[in-house]
């Protein structure tokens, strides 16, 4: 395996170690970071064009991870769940995720899944929910997030956003793209999210 795969896991871990939040500390402490690498074919998504701007927006503590992603964007396996019939082609041009570790990630882990989500500017990721508990940390600021029946609220880079099991949530970007780190635990790691009118993962 190329060395940048190990660097990806190391920088992902290093960023999380620097987050001053009890929920994140607990999640990080419960992960066995000696995970076996998994050979995956690279898969590119149109949303990777957002990484240059994301690298300009990311704060200093996220820069090592974001720079590695931008440099090796075409060497990694990026995924999409939905199709044009779900949310339209414009959404697919600006949406994608990378599972760093989990059941389908670059590193094998059958207890927790974690990775990175990209959303381009001016799109809405509609309300969805899943059994697994989810922790999100935006690595760029300015995106609006909604949870349950609440309103959308702007979240800044580095904020910790917790979605408990089966709590509906949505994201809405403005003029700038979103890169967010996620951790899934406590539920089926490959379960498709429930979305009105569609079935997906996110």
Image (cartoon, grey):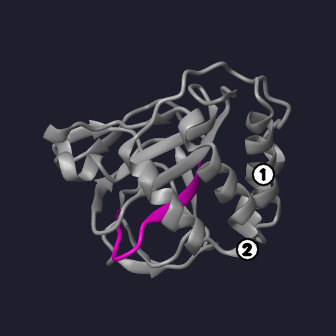
Examine the rendered structure and indicate whether residue 77 appears above or below residue 31: above
**Magenta span main SS:** strand
Q: What stretch is highlighted in magenta?
A: 171-183
Query: Which residue is under mark 1?
Result: 11
Find residue 170 and report its image quarter: bottom left
x, y (%) of residue 153? 40, 80
Q: For the residue carrying disc 2, how many other residues have a C-alpha within 10 Å: few (<14), some (14-19), or many (20+)?
A: few
| Marking on residue 60 | 2
Q: Along the line of sight, which residue is nearer the eye, 118 or 144?
A: 118
| Marking on residue 141 | none
- Judge whether residue 139 can be spotted in this image: no
Q: Along the line of sight, which residue is nearer the eye, 131 or 138?
A: 138
Q: Earlier in the sequence, mark 2 or mark 1?
A: 1
Q: Which residue is drawn at 35% across and 36% down?
A: 81
Find residue 62 and report its image quarter: bottom right
Disc 1 element: helix
Disc 2 element: helix
Q: Residue at x 54, y 79 (%)?
A: 156
x, y (%) of residue 102? 62, 31
Q: Does the magenta stretch include residue 175?
A: yes
Q: Distance between the residues labelled 2 and 1?
A: 13 Å
x, y (%) of residue 179? 52, 60
Q: For the residue carrying disc 1, how many other residues have a C-alpha within 10 Å: few (<14), some (14-19), or many (20+)?
A: some
Q: Which residue is drawn at 43% across and 31% down?
A: 191
């Amino acid at each position: 395996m190329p060395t940048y795969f190990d660097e990806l896991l190391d920088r992902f871990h290093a960023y999380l170690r620097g987050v001053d939040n009890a929920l994140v500390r607990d999640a990080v402490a419960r992960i066995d970071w000696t995970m076996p690498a998994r050979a995956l074919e690279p898969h590119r998504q149109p949303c990777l064009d957002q990484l240059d701007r994301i690298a300009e927006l990311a704060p200093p503590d996220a820069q090592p991870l974001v720079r590695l992603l931008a440099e090796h964007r075409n060497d990694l396996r990026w995924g999409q769940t939905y199709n044009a019939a779900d949310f339209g082609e414009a959404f697919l041009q600006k949406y994608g995720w990378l599972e760093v570790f989990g059941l389908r990630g670059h590193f094998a882990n059958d207890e927790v899944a974690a990775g990175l989500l990209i959303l381009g500017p001016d799109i809405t990721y509609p309300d969805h929910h899943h059994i697994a508990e989810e922790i999100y940390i935006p690595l760029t600021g300015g995106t609006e997030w909604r949870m349950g029946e609440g309103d959308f609220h702007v979240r800044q880079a580095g904020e910790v956003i917790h979605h408990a099991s089966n709590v509906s949530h949505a994201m809405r970007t403005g003029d700038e793209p979103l890169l967010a780190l996620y951790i899934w635990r406590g539920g089926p790691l490959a379960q498709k999210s429930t979305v009105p009118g569609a079935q997906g993962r996110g």
